[in-house]
Amino acid sequence: MSQSSNFVDYVKICCRSGHGGAGSSHLHRDILTSKGGPDGGDGGRGGHIIVKGSSQLWTLLHLKYRKHIIAENGFPGSSGQKSGRTGIDEILEVPLGTIARNAETGEIIFEITRDGETKILTPGGRGGLGNWHFKTSTKQTPRYSQPGEPGKEEWMVLELKILADVGLVGFPNAGKSTLLSVLSAAKPEIADYAFTTLVPNLGIVSYRDNRSFVMADIPGIIEGASKGKGLGIRFLRHIERNSVLLFMVPADTNRSITEEYEILLNELEQYNPELMQKPRILAVSKSDMLDDELMTEMKRELPAIPTIFISSVAQKGLVELKDMLWKVINEHITPTES
């Protein structure tokens, strides 16, 4: 199975939570008691469908073929005020950065951003009350109890938006995969043609003093991506969750560096204007082919953002790039941000 088919960032599932168990309407009877009072126990709650974050997962592939998620029903109460057993919850583990939304309304219900974090996706029905709850001074032996609440059945969407400190943004063949492979232990598929990267790749970049940060190679943008052209919106959504955007423009581009940067920026703005608030760094890749004179000339026409000339193959400017990224990441992240 190829890397592309292993990466699933969208699943639609039918969730059916458990019905609540019925309360009991039992009257106490034993060898010494022929007309005892009510002692029917409560029904158990129906099982929830719960979503749990796992840092060990990076795709929703394991849920792709589970179209129906069904939790167990609660059990009925019994005599002696014994409550019925709660239905077993159905727990769905998901990667960090997963958003849950209602498939019909599109409303976002919650998002999972921490390892071990749990949220109820579809709650189980409450168990019914047993008849001992309904005893009063005027009604000593109520012979009725509550039925359990029915569970819910609803279609939900789980959607993954990759959580990373740095998102690589650039046209196909800008050298993003090569940079990721050089800076981290990630092994993305690399070839000299457009759209080699069909899925986002994550890599952990080692920094000084045993520190590290996460970098994501997002598939290449093309003009019109915000309107769904090419790989389009499917991958633009991953950029939303990155703290810093590292724009990559190759030195051998047919356009000017600024022109290519502006096109990339425009695609992001069309997709989501809030992306314009994220800190940006520009890396001019494949710059080992430039001499000093040409580099000086290009610097005069660069956009007004922090810029660095790099070459992944020649290992040029990579230490300085990591320094720049680390500084910006830590300027823009506070402990309270998820």
Image (spheres, rainbow, N blue to C red):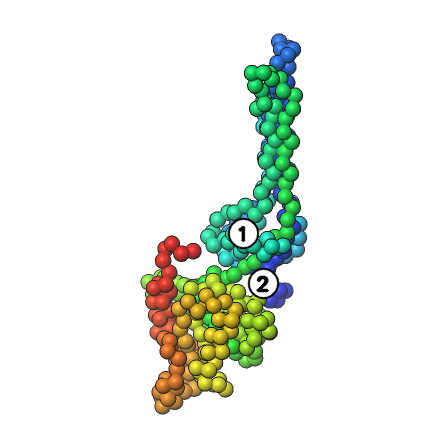
Label 2 is placed on what type of residue?
Phe
Name the quadrant containing residue 335: bottom left
Label 1 is placed on what type of residue?
Ile
Residue 109: assigned label: 1
Name the quadrant containing residue 313: bottom left
Q: Residue at x 39, y 80 (%)?
A: 303
Q: Residue at x 53, y 56 (%)?
A: 98
Q: Please indicate, yes or no, whether residue 50 appears anywhere in the rendered image.
A: yes
Q: Could you tell me which quadrant the C terminus lies in?
A: bottom left
Q: Could you tell me which quadrant the N terminus lies in?
A: bottom right
Name the quadrant containing residue 120: top right
Residue holding disc 2: 7
Spot occupied by residue 51 in the image (x, y as percentages of width and height): 55, 49
Q: Residue at x 36, y 90 (%)?
A: 293
Residue 302: assigned label: none
Spot occupied by residue 267 in the image (x, y as percentages of width and height): 51, 73
Decide: is 153 above or below 250. Answer: above
As drawn, the residue found furthest toward the bottom would be 293
Q: Please indicate, yes or no, whether residue 295 appears anywhere in the rendered image.
A: no
- Counting residues from the N terminus, which is met first, the one under dot 1 or under dot 2? 2
Question: Could you tell whether 304 is left or right of 120 in the image?
Answer: left
As drawn, the residue found furthest toward the front would be 138
